Image: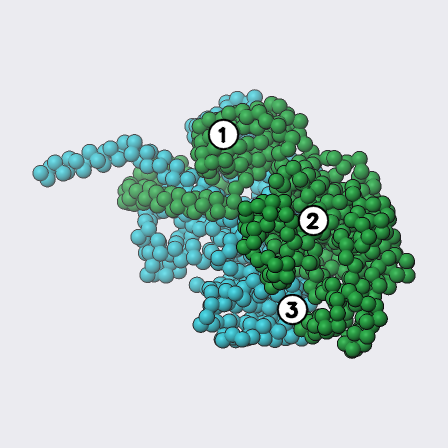
Chain colours: A green, B cyan
Amino acid sequence: MKNNEQHWLPHLSPQVVEEAKGHLLCGYTIALEGWRRGLQLTWYTDQAAPFQSMKTWYVHKPGKLFSLSSSTQTHYFFRSRGDLVSNEAVEAGGDKGETKKILLSAQVPTPKGDTFSSDVTDEAIKEFAVKLGYPLVLKPVNGSFGRGVISNISNDEDLAKALYLVRGELNEKEVIVEEYLPGKEYRLYVVGDKVVGAIERVPANVTGDGTATIRELMEAKNRQRKDNPRLVSCPIEIDDELMQKLEKEGRSLETVPGKDEVVFLREKSNISLGGDPVDRLDELSDEVKRIAIEALQAFPDFHHGGVDVITPSSDYGSDAVVLEVNPTAQIGSLLFPMKGKGRNIPSAIIDYYFPESKSQANKNRRTAFHFKELLLPLETRATISVDVPPPTSDKRYHKTLIVAGELNELEFKQGLKKAAVRMSVSGFMEAKSKHTSFFYIQSDSEEKLGQFVDYIQGEQSVQHVELFPMDHSLLFFKQGFEIREDKNQVMKDLKRLKRNMKKLQRKQSLLVGLVHSYTSTKQWGKRAYSSIKTKRVY
Amino acid sequence: MVTSQFNWLPHLENAIPYEATQKKISLYTIALEGWRRGLTLKFYSEIDGNHEHQLRYSLASKEREHHFQGSKGDKISNEAQRICDDKYLTNEALKKAGVPIPLGRKFEKEKTDQELVRYAEEIGFPIVLKPTNGSGGKGVIVNITSVDELTRSLQYVRKQLNYEEVIIEQFITGEEFRVYVLNNEVIAAVNRLPANVIGDGKSRISQLIEQKNEERKKVPHLYNRPIKLDKQFYTTTGAMGITLLTIPLKNERVMLKRISNISTGGDPVDVTDTMTEEMKQIAINAANAIPDLPHCGVDMIIDRNRNKGVVIELNTRPGIGSHLFPIEGKARDIPKALIDDYFPESDHEKARRSDVYFPLKEIEYVLRKNYGKEVIVTPAPSEPVVFKKLSVKSTESLKHLKSDLKNRLLSEHHIGFLDMKNDREFEIVLGNPDPNKLQDAVENLRNFIEKGKRVDLTIEPFSGPVSAQFAIIDPHVKKEDDLFHEIEETIAERLKVEKEIQKAKKRLTSIKNSRYLKWVLRKNKRTLLDKK
């Protein structure tokens, strides 16, 4: 079902971003775009000087801080945010009260409401609420991922409960009370004066097939989410909130929804709570897009970022109200929507920062650097930076092969890597079964490619080599010649190597002992000495 | 025997991580000296002739940046390098400068063996035969004493080994010295003794060798270079009538080999103070004979009794391990002298006070595999680091603490390590240049660990040196680069063993085919028959 509904960017397939899970995804895709265009890419630890003045968080693990350089300029990035975005914009964007003030003063529509500091009493807030009128939303000033956001409060009693929960239990004293606007929720991504991506955030839901229960449909949906690089760690989870929602609507987990019936499982639309990102860039009205652009422009130096809006009057908006702005927005859901097209946010960001690299935008799209491995010295803090070697461009000649034999032999694999370096052939070998592997190889010289195939054919552990013509234009490969295998295989290799080594050592000591037993008699020693010429070396 | 018997540099003791031992000693100790002084240290890779990525490094102060390759710095010109790499060009330059060298000359491949023999007779036997472009002593045949022997050697080197271009030289007897010259001064000299043991009047040779090999493991650049019982050993000891069972007298030094090669068990002995001024001057003149060669290693053969010496070779990238970690005599701080020379503005006191060193393992992995092309090493702390050790034990499993602890410790920028001994026991060493910050961190950590758990926690002072990172030592977790290193090392080790096996097999065949053995066997058979 997913394949005809989602159209992700071919050069940013799940395979390409496999090593960049969770919070590494945004930074990785932008870094990759720059690197593929030939910009110099460098990764850093939080101890590196350029990041001391930049607002960052959770950066003790590497993979979120990097820089890109062209021949004329260098820019530093934290996740999806570059250094053109000012710290003031970041601060204002993180403070919902401040955001409201700035948007209001720029006449960007926001929900009516106010911010209350920690010394304001609950009573005063209740008074304000009555004046504003129900329904309302209560949320902490500092918060994300929908934590402590209580929406659709419709009477005094619910408000008291909500205040107790947020200000009491969650201890978020500083809160915002604003009007509750029903409508569709969107996340737009703005770069400069353009909206380059937009998704609708649809609250967690399942679609019935007439036979499966809600529980079964949820499980199926979570499996589908696992295949999505952005949603892999955001399954729909069964909790009180979800059970209450079902109950309220007279359903349970065992209810069987009718065919094509959509059952919503939550009120909140957050992706992290199981919400579906659905691409709506083409559907959204220009009016909504204009409001999002104006929202960013209301802030000082807010060159790019996410804008969350709600469209109260119609689905795709004749108007929009801005809920939030996010200078460090996650772009994963725009790249990997559940429905619709993936939008090339990384390319738009790199175009904006490095307009001089636009002409290189389609280069090296099938390859990537070794992300996990190059982060190692940063992880252990051995270094504060690692420069990534530039991509070796796509080679002219290609071959795809199926090879059969004892291909797991360490000797074979080691020899293969060395031969690939020697003949400057790149590509990969991927095991398909115990005794067969798939090879994709490329080179600038047809002759060298042939030599490499001959080399494989000549190896002792190879039984059979078969040319396997296929469309290689969609194959993804990392730099150099890569042997795709997991750590377990490497551990196995090492174990076998060590066993083998022990045997050899035993053999050696036996042989040397044997020689010694022949030569240890005094007489024999003398004879041996005179018959064998000594050599002196310096 | 304990380490303290060595007269080494205190700031280098236990400050060389395993991955920097053996061949990387020179590179590491020089980089360490600069890094500890606060210079910016970068490592990068360069592709060599075998398409392999080799480690290079640079050091930089505010004023300047210098690039290094092993112990060679960029003050040595490419031209100087070219001359030193070519034995013929070196000899020409030395001859011109009046530096004593063994008489000899080069013969191109067109020259016939007869011409070579004639020349040998002219300069007089004994002579040495060596290829112009050999390395590691391959194809070098020494102490050739007759025309007959020379003819056979020529056959071997020019035909069998295919080194057609060779040098014939006088063979001069004496001891082999490696002299380190920096700016008109001899700053270190070692005499390389062939593998040897000193008797204690009780132990057998085999036991003495074992002891000596244990001792060699403590020497960073000799790690993995034990005295091997190879052909050399058997021929040398055989000639002296010694076997593995012989018990040498107390304090008797028994030479086990003739070759003084460090890698097969030879001992570096520091002789800087006993080398005569005349010999030092020869070394200095040799370095000065080549333009733009401010520092180098000079190989000499010196006859100490007659105070005579000749220069054999100049090395632009000499290994300095022997000078830093001699088995006998005083260590010479070449890294200090070099960095003083390249960065006179830097503070050498800082390096002497330092209690930290940098890890090289991940850096090497990333650069050698070309995952990265250049890295900047995390700067050394500018002040001396104070350390505390927390030892934690519990009767319950502490596994659940592990990931929280890791995150916490990694985010706090301490120097030190977490050593997960097992599920119920771990050690944390924390270091910080600011004692107050350290105290706070230790207290916070103690509270975190003790919170709601029954643990036995002790805190004590700790002294380095410690690797300047926060390392997680966990026997359950093997990182990719650890696996890579283990595989590389085991393969290298296997190659060595395979070679040894080949050698032993060859020797066994030659013994089995020798007439002597047949004679012995026949004799034994006869005596057996006689007895019957």
Which residue is most to the left? B532
Q: Are marks 1 and 3 on the same chain?
A: no
Marks counted in the figure total 3
Chain of the residue under the numbered disc 3 shown in the image? B
Indicate which label's residue lies in the foreground, 1 or 3.
1
- Cα separation, mark 2 vs mark 3, equals 46 Å
Give the quarter of the image for residue A471: top right
* Residue toward you, B491 or A362: A362
- C-alpha separation, residue under disc 1 versus residue under disc 3: 55 Å
Q: Tell me the number on the disc at residue B432.
A: 3
Q: Earlier in the sequence, mark 2 or mark 1?
A: 2
Residue A18 appearing in the image = no
Residue at coordinates 51% horizontally, 59% vertically from top-left?
B474
- Can you say whether A466 is above or below A409 in the image? above
Q: Residues within 10 Å of mark 3 (few under 14, many from 20)?
A: many
Give percent across and percent down for residue B143.
46, 37
Q: Residues within 10 Å of mark 2 (few under 14, many from 20)?
A: many
Q: Give whichever of A190, B300 is nearer the camera.
A: A190
Mark identifier at residue A403: 1
Amino acid under disc 2: Pro
- In what element is the residue under mark 3? strand
- Element carrying mark 1: strand
Judging by the rendered image, the residue that carries numbered circle 2 is A277
Image-based side of B102 in relation to A342, left or right = left
Q: Tell me the chain of label 1.
A: A
Q: Secondary structure at mark 2?
A: strand
In the drawing, does residue B484 fall left or right of residue A45? left
Marks 1 and 3 in Cβ contact (< 8 Å): no
Q: Are marks 2 and 1 on the same chain?
A: yes
Q: Nearer the viewer, residue A468 or A125?
A: A125
- The crowd level at tag 1 (other Cα within 10 Å; few <14, some 14-19, many 20+) is many
